[in-house]
Image (cartoon, rainbow, N blue to C red):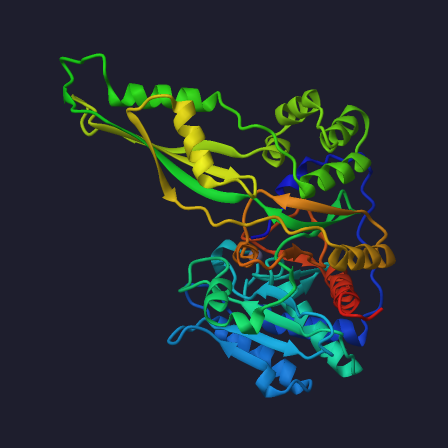
Amino acid sequence: MKHAGLIVVLVMLQAPLGAQAPRPVSANDQRARDIFEQLININTTGSSGSTTIAATAMAKRLTDAGFPAADVQVIGREGSRNFNLVARFRGTGSEKPILLLSHIDVVEAKREDWSVDPFTFLERDGFFYGRGTMDVKDGSAILVATLVRLKQEGYRPNRDLILALTTGEEGGSDYNGVEWLLANHRDLIDAAFVINMDAGDPVILNGRRLMRTVQASEKVYVTFKLEVHNPGGHSSLPPKDNAIYRLAAALGRLSAYEFPAQLNEITRASFTRWAQLQQGQLATDMAAVAQATPDTAAIRRLSDMSPLYNAQLRTTCVATELAGGHAENALPQSASATVNCRMLPGTPSAEVQSTLSRVVNDTAVTVSVVTAAIPSPPSPLKPEIMDPVERVTKRLWNIPVVPVMETGATDGLYLRNAGIPVYGVSGVFVDINDIRAHGRDERIGVQDYYDGAEYIYQLVKSVSGGR
Ligand SMILES: [Zn+2]
C-alpha cells in the first residue's frame, strides 16, 4: 500500500523550486544506503522471491551491531519461504514498548517492463531505483539503520523498541505476516502503539516540501452482492417481471443515494490543516466542515468538487461488477451486481447492509455480504505520538503536520483491530506527481532517503525518552 490519492487534491500555486540541495554523505547516510542496497538486491516478490532471505540479512546486521541473538528472530509459518524479522531493542521498561513496522515483500516487477533491472540497486541522477525503493524497503532499511545507529551510540530508550519487518503485505505470497504474528506471537509484537513506515508520507508538490502527513485512520473495506432471481422463460413471451430490469432499477436507486456526511477526530484535523494550506472559498469550506457543527453548504460544495473530498466525508458504496442472464433468447433467471463499500471507521457493516436494503427498496433484491469487513478503529491523536512528530518535523523540516484518514487499507488494520493504535509516519518525501510504487522504474530521491533516515532516527529517539 503506497499512494497519496487524497493529497493530489491539494492543487497548490507555488512555483517549482527544484530538488533539495544535496549535502555531503555522512557515515550514517552511508550505512543507511548500504542496508537499502542490500535489501533492494534481494528479490522478495511473492512469485519467485523470499522474505526469509531479506529478514535473515537484516537480522545479521543487528547481531553484528551487538543485539543479542535471542532478541533477533526470523520467524514465520513452518514450510514457508516468507518469514518475518522481529527484533527487540531493550529499554529501561518505564514505558510500554513501541512497535516499528515495515514490510519487506514487494510487488512483482518484470525486467522487460522496466528501463533498468528492478532487482539491482541503482543510483542515477539523484534517485535510487529498484523494486521496493518507495514501497517500502526504504522504510525497512531506515528502521534497521536507526536501530544499529542507536545501539552503537549506547542509547538506552525508556521503553523497548520492537522492530517488525513483515511479509505478505502486497499479497501474492503464502500468508500475511502481521496477521500471522498477531495470531501466533502477539507477545513478541505487543506495544503501546505502532509507527508504520508503509503510510503517512511527507509530501513534495511542485518541487516543494509541502507537509508531513500522519496516517491515523483508514476506511473499512466491505463488499456486498445484490441479487435477483426469477423463474425465467422464453424471451418471445416476456412478462412484466424481469430479473435484469429489477436489478437495474435497484442500482438506479442506489446510484442516487448518498450516505450522510460524518466527521471524526482525524478528518476534522485534516480539513483544519488543509484549510491553512488553501485559499479563498476552498479554504473557507474546509475550515467550515471541520467545525463541531459542520456547515452543510460547505459539505455539499466539497462533496461535489472531488471524489477525494467526498470519500473523506462519508461512507461510499459503488457498483463494480454486473452479471445476469444465460442466453440471448431466454428470460434472465438471475441478475446480480457487486457493490464495494468503503465505510467510515466505526460504522457497523450490518448498518450499511440494512441501508442498502432500504435504498434498494425491493424485497426481490437480496443484499448479502461477499467480503466481510475487518474493523479498523481510528487511532487517537495522542500527545505521546503527536508531540514528538510535531517536534521533529519542526526541527528538521518546518512544515505542517497533517493527520489523515486513508481511503485504502494497510496491514495496520489488523493491529488497530487488535486494539493497538497505528500511526503511518514514513520519513521519506514522496513527490505526488511521481508516485511509482507498484509501477515501473520505482524510485525515490537520494537526498530524500538520507533525510528520511535522519528523521526516523530522531523520531524514534523522541518517542522513547531521548531528545
Ligand atoms: Zn507497502
**Residue 333 to residue 274: above or below:** above
**Residue 404 to residue 75: above or below:** above
Residue that appears at 48% across and 57% down: 112
> Which residue is at the far front?
94
| Residue 9 falls in image quadrant | top right
Whole-percent x and y of residue 309? Answer: 64, 32
Foreground of the two, 443 or 308: 308
Q: Quadrant of ligand 1?
A: bottom right
Foreground of the two, 90 or 112: 90
Whole-percent x and y of residue 389? Answer: 77, 57
Whole-percent x and y of residue 165? Answer: 57, 69
**Residue 411 to residue 356: above or below:** below
Whole-percent x and y of residue 184? Answer: 46, 71
User: Seen in the image, is 201 located left or right of residue 79?
Assistant: right
User: Seen in the image, is 344 located left or right of residue 391?
Assistant: left
Foreground of the two, 45 or 299: 299
Residue that appears at 79% across and 66% down: 462
| Residue 20 falls in image quadrant | bottom right
Q: Please count the marks in the image.
A: 0
Foreground of the two, 222 or 48: 222
**Residue 368 to residue 329: above or below:** below
Residue that appears at 42% across and 64% down: 175
Quadrant in the picture for the C terminus: bottom right
Residue that appears at 66% across and 70% down: 97
